[in-house]
Amino acid sequence: MIKIDNLYKSFGEDAHPLQGVSIEVAKSEFALIMGRSGCGKSTLLNCICGIEIADKGDIYINDKKINLANAKESNKIRKEDIGIIFQQYYLLTNTIVYNQIALICDASEDDIDEILKALEIYDLKNKRIEDCSGGQQQRVCIARALAKKPKILFADEPTANLDASLALVSVKLMRDIAKTLGSALLVITHDDRIVPYADTVFYLENGKIAKKETKEVS
Ligand SMILES: Nc1ncnc2c1ncn2[C@@H]1O[C@H](COP(=O)(O)OP(=O)(O)OP(=O)(O)O)[C@@H](O)[C@H]1O
Ligand SMILES: [Mg+2]
């Protein structure tokens, strides 16, 4: 479903976060990318979703190469097939919770309500995003990405602002929806609490995947 082949990305002379990263995640697979702060996890995500341009290497989504040469097709794939939960949220200002989701996808109000309920933010449906707490905003991001029913779901530290119980609720919901849809789920995290739920863990270290673990899911 997604294949990253020998990806390189540097920033100037001093930062070389990606030095030949290769990753493959299959349909219905739940993969984690773990690694120390500053090791290049968000850079990798930014390259996949087109916010940064990699220096070298290839990204394939459903066997289609994503690059500048076919920018139009690449953007269509990104728009239609990929859901992203960003580390910095990127929610719409001055907009209520329900519209954060309804404005960007075709999900019905019933479907949106169901996801809001599952994430325990249904009572915030008509609240302005600025009036929600950090953890509430994080769950709106998760709801927004899930409502899109993407073929590939990326999440960058989706539980960073959630307590233990909400972190598990959120991760299980992401996993269950991804499995139901047959989507690939790729989560970047420091959060050891998520590890037992993933099928695969990639460890990013010194610009490369240092280790890959495949597990029995609990
Ligand atoms: N736009 C940029 N310009 C210059 N340097 C950058 C840029 N983006 C990232 N970096 C550098 O690249 C390295 C990797 O950053 P990145 O954000 O990918 O780390 P991360 O693994 O996501 O860390 P964290 O766990 O803290 O979120 C860091 O040293 C960072 O300072
Ligand atoms: Mg990061």
Image: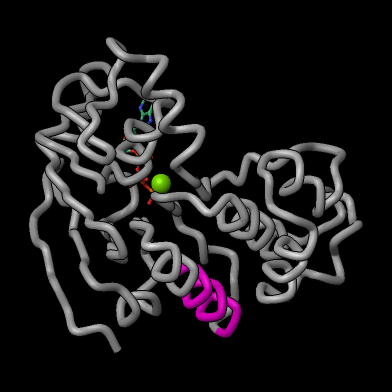
- Tell me, yes or no, whether the highlighted magenta stretch contains residue 168: yes
Q: Nearer the viewer, residue 169 or 163?
A: 169
Q: Main secondary structure of the magenta part?
A: helix
Could you tell me residue 58's position as x and y percent? 17, 28
Could you tell me residue 150's position as x and y percent? 48, 50
In the image, is 100 to the left or to the right of 34?
Answer: right
Q: Nearer the viewer, residue 200 or 106?
A: 106
**Please, which colouring scheme is shown?**
one colour
Could you tell me residue 32's position as x and y percent? 29, 62
Residue located 22% across and 54% down the image? 25
In the image, is 17 to the left or to the right of 180?
Answer: left
Hey, which quadrant is residue 90 in on the image? Answer: top right
Single out the residue that lies furthest toward the top. 69
Residue located 39% across and 79% down the image? 193
Quadrant of ligand 1: it is top left
In the image, is 85 to the left or to the right of 69?
Answer: right
Q: Nearer the viewer, residue 71 or 133?
A: 71
- Tell me, yes or no, whether the highlighted magenta stretch contains residue 112: no
Q: Quadrant of the C terminus?
A: bottom left
Q: Which residues are magenta?
A: 165-174
Single out the residue that lies furthest toward the bottom. 218
